[in-house]
Amino acid sequence: MFLRFRTEKTTSIALAAAMFFSVVAFAATPRAHADDDRSKCQHRIEKAEAHYADAVRDHGERSEQAEHRRHELNEERERCYQTSHSWWSSQDHRWHKDRDWDRDDYDHNHDRDRDQH
């Protein structure tokens, strides 16, 4: 009888532990997935920003190549905004929650300010 009680108790403990770890793993999965999505978004935006900067440097800001790369950069920002309601800015190293990348086109605004002086 003692052995039967001990086996039932061990089984109950093992079952409770399995349920606990299942709940913890299930609860952590969306957060890990969201972090992975943001990391991928950040990488894609940084890559698009680098391509845009290269095009501006090599061909000029108002060139067809720069316009094409700016369009691709804004598409990446839009894609990230649609999935995580935020977009990454390498210029200030932070996530933005407002869909304002056109207003905050740092390279574009910087050149416009320089042309006015």
Image: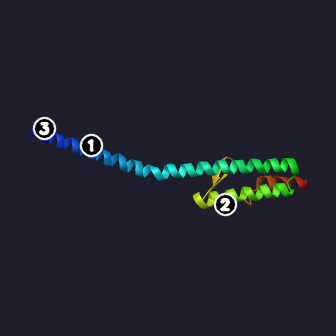
What residue is shown with label 2? 78
Does residue 12 appear anywhere in the picture? yes
What residue type is disc 2 on?
Answer: Glu
The tag earlier along the polypeptide, 1 or 3, is 3
- Where in the figure is residue 7, as x and y percent of width and height? 18, 41
Residue at x 67% of width, y 50% of height: 44
What residue is shown with label 3? 3
Q: Quadrant of the N terminus?
A: top left
Does residue 89 appear anywhere in the picture? no
Tell me if residue 91 comes above or below residue 75 in the rendering. above
- Where in the figure is residue 115, as x and y percent of width and height? 90, 55
Q: Within the image, what quadrant is residue 62 found in?
A: bottom right
Q: Secondary structure beneath disc 1?
A: helix
Q: Within the image, what quadrant is residue 104 found in?
A: bottom right
What residue is shown with label 1? 14
Residue at x 65% of width, y 47% of height: 43
Q: Secondary structure beneath disc 3?
A: helix
Checking the image for residue 100, the label placed there is none
Q: Secondary structure beneath disc 2?
A: helix
In the picture provided, is 21 more to the left or to the right than 87? left
Q: CA distance from mark 3 to mark 2?
A: 63 Å
Q: CA distance from mark 1 to mark 2?
A: 47 Å
